[in-house]
Amino acid sequence: MSLSAHDLLYSNSHHSNDDEQNLASIDELQQLLCHLLKYTETEFLLKKREPIQSQDLIQAFYRQAKELREGKPLAYIIGQAPFMSHTYLIQPGVLIPRHDTECLVEHSIRLLHTLKKDYSSIVGVECGVGSGIISIECALAHPTTHFHAWDISQKALDIAKHNATRLGASNITFHHGNFFDGIQDILKKHPNSLPFIISNPPYIETDTIQTLEDSVKNYEPHLALDGGTNGLEFYDAFFSLIQSIPSVLLCEFGYNQKNALQALARKYELYTIEFFQDLSQNDRYFIARTID
């Protein structure tokens, strides 16, 4: 007897094993099935009771559903993740995009529109480009602004470049190496441009990483998570950088780091710093300025 998508979905959602701590949700299993069947969500609803003819596809689903139950993130299994209105290619070793980062990106896009009224030239720069979501979305929204994006991971850069090409973001230059070394050359090449710095840097305390969910600590790159002993290493370096140059800095941060960041900003006597919340009303990102 042939199995339908409905049969596969609900037989696996009730599967349990004492060795599997993270059971896959119905939603994730459905996304996996849609990916394998090349169905949209609407097509799945219309065709979910039709028999699946391909035994190879059924076996692939069983195999990948097991990976899901074992805690492997769906994005790494299907090789992609949604962000804003686009789909980004993702591979193990590259941080998976989070929806909360959309708040940072949307605000960045709006702020760039505002700043262009007062500044004839702006250069966008990103530290830790990952899969490219931040620079690509900003570059697509502002095709006349050039962006420079850094990562110390070659794998992340390769994925970001591929995503930029797929989505048509041709106004980004990617750099492999240390952002804080490389940006000095960019500032020298654009002495009359306002630096617009964006980052979702590593901000988790080193000792906290082992307490994260298995799907994060066992699969996602610690290089993109580890913010040092107090989680503030990158912010300290950012504030030191912008202290001496007129610029705008937008950064994501951990939900419990606002007070520490306020104290750090006072240390560097920044002109202004504003904090904003994410979709869950958690403190999530800030805008720091060294301009009027």
Image (cartoon, rainbow, N blue to C red):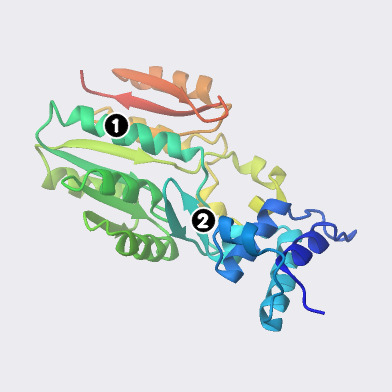
Q: Is residue 18 left or right of residue 93?
A: right
Q: Which mark is residue 188?
A: none
The N terminus - image quarter:
bottom right
Q: Which residue is painted at 51% across and 56% down in the image?
A: 81
Task: Please name the amino acid that badge 2 sits on.
Answer: Ala
At 60% from the left and 70% from the top, the residue drawn is 36
Per the image, label 2 sits on a secondary structure element best described as strand
Graded by Cα atoms within 10 Å as few (under 14), some (14 to 19) or many (20 or more), the crowding at tag 1 reads few
Q: Are marks 1 and 2 in contact (CB under 8 Å)?
A: no
- Vertical side of 264 occupied by 66: above or below: below
Q: Position of residue 161 (x, y in %)?
A: 33, 63
Q: CA distance from mark 1 to mark 2?
A: 24 Å
Would you say 3 lies left or right of 266 here? right
The residue indicated by pointer 2 is: 81
Residue 289 in view in this figure: yes
Foreground residue among 150 and 119: 119
Instruction: Read off the residue under disc 1.
Output: 110
Q: Position of residue 247 (x, y in %)?
A: 23, 30
What residue sits 27% from the left and 44% below the top? 141
Indicate left or right for 267 with 120 as reference.
right
